Image (tube, rainbow, N blue to C red):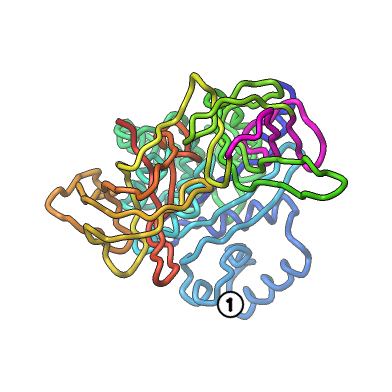
Amino acid sequence: MPGIDEEGELLRFSTAGSVDDGKSTLIGRLLYDTKTVFEDQVQHVEDVSRRRGDERVNLALLTDGLRAEREQGITIDVAYRYFATKRRKFIIADTPGHVQYTRNMVTGASTAQLSIVIVDARHGLLEQSRRHAFIASLLRIPHLVFAVNKMDLVGWDEQTFLRIENEFRNFAARLDIQDIAFIPMSALTGANVVERSVEMPWYHGPTLLHHLETVHITSDRNLIDVRFPVQWVIRPQSEQHPDYRGYAGQVAGGVLRVGDEVLVLPSGVPTKITRIEQHGVEVEAAFPPMSVTIHLADNVDLSRGDMLCRPNNQPTVGQDLDAMICWMADRPLQVQGRYALKHTTRWSRAMVTDVLYRMDVNTGHRDETLHTLGLNDLGRIRLRAMTPIIYDPYKQNRATGSFILVDETTNETVAAGLLLGD
């Protein structure tokens, strides 16, 4: 379809790895070698590296923005960075590796289309590497890159790389990951990051940047199930536009076209699309993740939180929800706890009716003896929303299948959740 590939020029990806695996250095290398770093930033990093006594420029400082991170040499927050090449634009989420920052990793990876799991070639597959891959699978990130870093410290040995690759393939067989690439590299020297390594002639695959530029992401979006959550009703009521009524929002699924029959949920009223506008310009079609204004043939009762869909392809509308969540608050989750639930553009109050189990993300084991979740725990719960929620299972649509829980007394986001199907 004309225009859809244009939206595919942007790739969102996250990085994760154990402490000292070199993920911040890898991102710094990408930014440095693609010449997307300002000269004053480079100068600052060079000065800091010199004061610290580093042997060479510490590219990790380009992403480790917090003072606490620089002092400890670890990543504790999500650092977002932007860069671009001639082929594609990128948004990077450099996420924490340590188990106590699982919530930060979930936050950073929640919108990613690709995840890079970095391992130290000297240490191989560690517990944290398994946890990162498990979370990527849970979040249904379509593409995974397993980056075996620090190959320079193992003499660029092919057998070391193959052993780690085989070990991870055996582990990944239990996960729901469709596309995995394995790349041996050295972020410190730049081998196979942007430029091809001359030290590893036995590797015939792409460099990391080439893979990021060419991985096919257009088909990752749900272009079948039409979902349009209404964010804002536009009624200027001015003399120039006395009858103007538009419904603004971001397309969450499918393709909407002028003339399409649509259904308004939760009311169930049918109507037709008469006009679609993007930035004030009329377009014939809209698809994810375009933000547009929809005009309808009928003056229907439609407000923020309602959704447009196809009459013969409707999402679930319900109040009893089954979900996997990552608990993000210091205060543990309790059964009968009440929270504000934010789903697409709709807010509702909700109560936790049951905690079914806590998931051990390192082993995949389900502990059904616990009926609470603590900070950074992942588990399956049941919720009862006070108003109907219009949703799809997360595996079908990440936009309409995700939500957050907010503590209304503190306004703190306490959980991020994925809605499950029947």
- Badge 1 marks a residue whose secondary structure is loop
> In the rendering, at what x and y percent does residue 245 appear?
72, 41
Residue placed most toward the observer, 260 or 355: 260
Residue 299 falls inside the magenta stretch: yes
Query: Could you say which quadrant of the image residue 101 lies in?
Result: bottom left
Amino acid on which the number 1 mark rests in the picture? Gly
Stretch in magenta: 275-301
> In the rendering, at what x and y percent does residue 85 appear?
74, 43
Q: Is residue 150 left or right of residue 198?
A: left
Q: Residue at x 32, y 69 (%)?
A: 330
Res. 181 in view: no
Give the farthest residue toward the bottom: 51
> In the rendering, at what x and y percent does residue 268 appear?
49, 29
Residue placed most toward the observer, 169 or 410: 410
Q: Quadrant of the C terminus?
A: top left
Q: Residue at x 34, y 48 (%)?
A: 385
Count the marks: how many? 1
Q: Residue at x 57, y 44 (%)?
A: 303
**Badge 1 density bin: few <14, some 14–19, many ≥20, Cα 10 Å:** few
Q: Is residue 331 left or right of residue 369?
A: right
Res. 241 in view: yes
Residue 339 falls inside the magenta stretch: no
Q: Residue at x 56, y 40 (%)?
A: 229
- Position of residue 364 relative to residue 253, above or below, is below
- Which residue was labeled with disc 1? 53
Q: Is residue 189 left or right of residue 71?
A: right
Residue placed most toward the observer, 50 or 344: 344
